Image: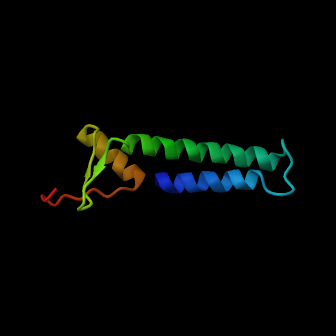
């Protein structure tokens, strides 16, 4: 999963926790809230890591992090770095 997918999953689990018929404190509410929190945290980590990055008009990603860290976070966040020499 990439950052946006984690964010979407967090929203889905949060909605499930508040679905009709689920009472506060029910196991379904507690587990859905826990899953929502995990996905929200992973989305935040991906967004934070990519916050200093610049995506050029040609789709290349220039990370503000050291090269090795930037490439690792791009891979985890689902961003494909392109090098064209025109950026």
How many marks can you see? Answer: 0
User: Which quadrant of the rendered structure holds the C terminus?
Assistant: bottom left
For the rendered model, the colour scheme is rainbow
User: In screen coordinates, is 16 left or right of 25?
Assistant: left
Q: From what the image shows, is residue 57 above or below residue 74?
A: below
Q: Along the line of sight, which residue is nearer the eye, 68 or 54?
A: 54
x then y, percent, for residue 15: 71, 55
- Based on the displayed image, in which of its 4 quarters is residue 40 positioned? top right
Q: Along the line of sight, which residue is nearer the eye, 35 or 48?
A: 48
Q: Along the line of sight, which residue is nearer the eye, 65 or 1?
A: 65
Give me the residue at 27% from left, 60% from top: 59
Q: From what the image shows, is residue 85 above or below residue 23?
A: below
Q: Along the line of sight, which residue is nearer the eye, 35 or 16?
A: 16
Give me the residue at 38% from left, 42% from top: 51
Give me the residue at 51% from left, 47% from top: 43
User: In screen coordinates, is 74 left or right of 83?
Assistant: right
x then y, percent, for residue 82: 23, 59
Residue farthest left in this picture: 85
Give me the residue at 63% from left, 53% from top: 11
x then y, percent, for residue 32: 72, 49
Residue farthest front in this picture: 57
x then y, percent, for residue 45: 47, 41
């Amino acid at each position: 999963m990439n950052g946006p997918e984690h964010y979407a999953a967090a929203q889905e689990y949060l909605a499930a926790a508040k679905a009709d018929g689920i009472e506060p404190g029910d196991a379904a509410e507690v587990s859905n809230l826990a899953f929502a929190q995990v996905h929200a945290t992973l989305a935040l980590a991906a967004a934070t890591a990519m916050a200093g990055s610049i995506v050029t008009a040609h789709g290349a990603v220039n990370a503000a992090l050291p090269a090795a860290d930037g490439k690792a976070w791009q891979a985890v966040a689902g961003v494909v770095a392109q090098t064209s020499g025109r950026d």
